[in-house]
Amino acid sequence: MPKISVIMPVYMAEKYVKDAVQSILNQSYSDFELIIIDDKGTDNSISIIEGIKDCRIKILENDSNRGIAFSRNKGIEKATGEYIALMDDDDFAPAYRLKTENEFLDLNLDISVVGGAMHIIDQSNDVIRYNYCEMIHNPDRLRAELLFRDVVMNGSAMFRREFILSNSIKYQDHMNGMEDYRFWIDCSVLGKIVNLDHVLLYWRDNPENETARNKSLLKIERQETYKKIQEYALKVNGFRLSENELKCFQKGYAEGGKTFLNKEDLEQLYWVIRKIMKQGKEKPFSKQLDLVCKRMFGRSIENSYVWNL
């Protein structure tokens, strides 16, 4: 059996899927299988993949277009490797990615998930943004950050298969492109996630991919889903807010983090953050929670009425 299973759902990606597949096949670490999940697109994506002759490629077919959450879960279920690496059909990975993550998990047995940094590329493979966001290394801080926002680059991640299966962690349907955010919340509660400073993913700014489609076509639905995920994150971590407090929190930390807050909003948010910090005093990640809460409230001040005085 291979040491690593790479799972790649494929749907309507004929422009870029060959580059994505080749970036995995060209890895410096070769003990892996590449599981392609055909989500029944109507373009030539699967024909292109079938034209690549490599015994490490395995193609699974969905019975119909089932979506990315179903496809990823299917890939995880069929994987045989000790570790599972995620990959999207329009991105590409640097040649050292699998080797770097494999070695890290081999040496750090207490870590369940490892991810890394990413550069954003355009449709011509040119980098248009370096190091998309700050890499968070401390598992406790990462768990606290996930109360507010997603800080794991999904396509850069590798995790222990046994950890996912034994805890019955799955990608959830109907997340409007944010199924990974919910997935990492569950992982952070039941295990430890670490991000490395290494660039492990080149993420394509592609107006045709699922994330872009959800942002443009399902903007309102996506906003509501983001709120539900934040509510879930608070609840599963043991925090309890009133309905009004939760609405205040969600307004202050909406997706994108650019919500303008008036004086009343900011004052209310201050007390909500203080309540979260108080409820977190006995939690194992309390120290990092305090730091994250203070930092996130500082960002709220930056986007508030204070600077319009």
Image: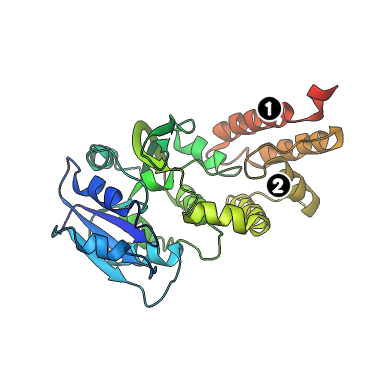
Among the two numbered marks 2 and 1 on one chain, the one whose residue lies closer to the N terminus: 2
Out of 144 and 126, give the one closest to the viewer: 126
To which residue does mark 2 refer?
250
Residue 97 placement: quadrant: top left
Instruction: State the count of labels.
Output: 2
Left/right of residue 60 with respect to residue 305 in the rendered view = left
State the image coordinates of residue 124 (x, y, percent, origin top left).
37, 40
Residue at image x 77%, y 38%? 269
Q: As drawn, is 106 to the left or to the right of 191?
A: left
- Observer able to see residue 232: no
Badge 2: how crowded within 10 Å, few (<14), some, or many (20+)? many
Q: Residues within 10 Å of mark 1 (few under 14, many from 20)?
A: few
- Establish if 38 lies above or below 179: below
Residue type (three-letter) at the residue carrying disc 2:
Gln
Residue 177 at what x, y percent from top left?
52, 56
Question: In the image, residue 110 lies at what x, y percent?
Answer: 34, 42
Asked whether the viewer can see residue 215, the reply is yes
